[in-house]
Image: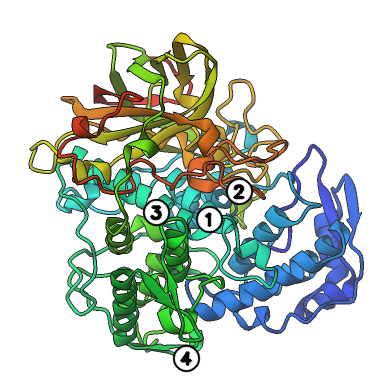
Amino acid sequence: RPSEPCFMQKGEEKAVFEIPDNYYPEKYQRVSNAISSRFGSDAGRMIPIRNIALPNLDLPMELPYNEQFSLFVPKHRQMAGKLIDIFMGMRDVEDLQSICAYCQLRINPYMFNYCLSVAILHRSDTKGLQIPTFAVCFPDKFMDPKVFRKAREVTSVVPTGARMPIVIPSNYTASDAEPEQRVAYFREDIGTNLHHWHWHLVYPFDAADRALVNKDRRGELFYYMHQQMIARFNIERFCNDLRKVETYSDFRGPIKEGYFPKMDSQVASRAWPPRFAGSFLRDLDRPIDQIRIDISELEIWRDRFLKAIEDMAVILPNGRQMPLDEETGIDVLGNLMESSTISVNRPYYGDLHNMGHVFIGYCHDPDHRHLEPFGVMGDLATTMRDPLFFRWHGYIDSVFHLYKYKLTPYSDDRLIFPDIRVRSISLDGKGAPNMLNTFWEQSTVDLARGLDFSPRGSVLARFTHLQHEDYSYVIEVNNTGRSSVMGMFRIFIAPTLDENKRPLNFDEQRKLMIELDKFSQGLKPGNNTVRRRSVDSSVTVPFERTFSNQADRPGNPGSPESAEFDFCGCGWPQHMLIPKGTTEGYPMVLFVMVSNWNDDRVEQDLVGSCNDAASYCGIRDRKYPDRRAMGFPFDRPAPAATTLSDFLRPNMAVRDCIVRFTDRTRQRGQQE
Ligand code: CUO
């Protein structure tokens, strides 16, 4: 894309970078003048690019420009780590801009985008910089390629003002004969995939600056965020008459699920390879990716994890044992499992989770004889599309749960908040009380930046996603003490029935508790009514942030700010906060616990930080804002409780509710 880098600020006037001649790749150097006059002739502003002493880019340039890039592939991770270091090490923004101008035509675009995104997110002089969301730079990773063919047609024939949005079909990857298709709306949702991509951008695997990798409770958040994704997916499955995810742990057996992504990579000009039902993992030997590894290695790592949990201790490189204690054990395990460069013993525990993605991603061409790239499992932006993603992460989750089963159940003094009684919780929204309403919604994104063929002007695409009516929680709390206190409100929701429509026992149900919100609130002596809106959830980012798109705002189509966001983008999409439910009404139970904020709080200054989706993403440059274990109070078993009611304490309350799905599609902004 020699014309407009995806990161270029979009304004009223066209701005064009003035690139030093020696920055052009050799093949363009002779025609550099022609190129700059072609793209600069209608420029309102020229931005001179500093000619700097260039750092050594040999390592990141080893990845060919038109290849796929995967953070799961160790070699790619190293190359990206180096490029991140280079971007982080630039003296100021002008130098960063300069090195980017140099890299843009030389470095693999996916790797370039990833590394620059990580750098912009972490450099002190680029915080708050508005950049377009990934789905808009690389729409090919998120949608049916037919859209691009139509876009080509539209942009070459129809003038900008008269362009109608292109409709992206929903449910285009399989027919109804494939049961897994019933939850494709979750797996293939643009927002859930963006959230997942963004999470990994906030938590990079590799960089010389350890602070980028070694973030507060990173390993624990790796466990918790993915655990919640699996729990959410399981609930969607129940709503669609599917059984719970079967964890994937027999690396030698056939893989039941096939997956045919029906996407094209615009950079590699290739279709993403499918996986046929009944495929097997095979030993990998792909010199091109510098990967040579046998399945037995995965099994050895797996067994070492199981042994560590059995012993409640991990082995350090010096041969000593490090106990897995109840405070930090999950964090240590998460870092070992992921794994990133802060694993305490990578040589011994290996790279289990990442290599699982790699083995699955390459099972169609394990020795590269067909010159095929990886399937969607090999890419962070696409991996969630594949049903097997949830089986693989479901397995990883089950290993973390094994550890949690070893911990002592929470005692009353950790659960109870003396003087605080939660009288009730209820839902207040449109329609019947304690009813959550879901439906399909159509929204619009502008894809223009991600289409390298398009003449300028917006290319709107319309896609369908799940949505729910906004609602509020109403919580009645009685403070029997004599002074005001601060309470930490923890709200979860879970199904009440299992896949056979039998009541869930507590141990199963707690693992299906999905977090909806967490917030603190002062409680005066006596009765307090606390109201909290669903749109303020600590789990989600607002719809506009997910899509970074304001094309739907009335009177503001394709405004200059559209398709840009300030990089606080990590967060579960608000439109996926509530599971789909069923047309008859799906029974769930809402739970609230008020714990003592004085025990839970983390002293820190939050001014100016991104903190509105902290539950799954943490807070940029800060500690995780809750001292309790992530998922508290449901992260540990409570053998004394057979049902949720057995578990309840005076500072907790539940409410049965119904999630009703209406099979109609509304336009975003349209009222029922
Ligand atoms: Cu997020 Cu496997 O860590 O996909």
Q: Which mark is residue 624?
A: none
Q: Amino acid at mark 2?
A: Lys
Q: Which residue is mark 1?
A: 217
Q: Position of residue 531 (x, y in %)?
A: 46, 15
Q: Which residue is mark 3?
A: 226
Q: Nearer the viewer, residue 641 or 220?
A: 641
Label 4 residue near ligand 1, CB within 8 Å: no
Give the answer, above or below, for where 63 lies relative to 412.
Answer: below
Tell me the mark number nearer the camera, choosing from 3 and 4: 3
Which corner quadrant holds the N terminus? bottom right
Which corner quadrant holds the C terminus? top left
Query: Of marks 2 and 1, which one's residue comes earlier in the chain?
Result: 1
Q: Which mark is residue 287?
A: 4
- Check contact, mark 2 vs mark 1: CB within 8 A: yes
Q: Position of residue 201 (x, y in %)?
A: 57, 57
Dot 2: what SS? loop
Q: Nearer the viewer, residue 349 or 52?
A: 349
Instruction: State the separation of the CA atoms marked 3 and 4.
Output: 31 Å
Dot 1: what SS? loop
Dot 4: what SS? helix
Q: Position of residue 421 (x, y in %)?
A: 36, 19
Instruction: State the separation of the CA atoms marked 1 and 3.
Output: 14 Å
Tell me the mark number nearer the camera, choosing from 1 and 4: 1
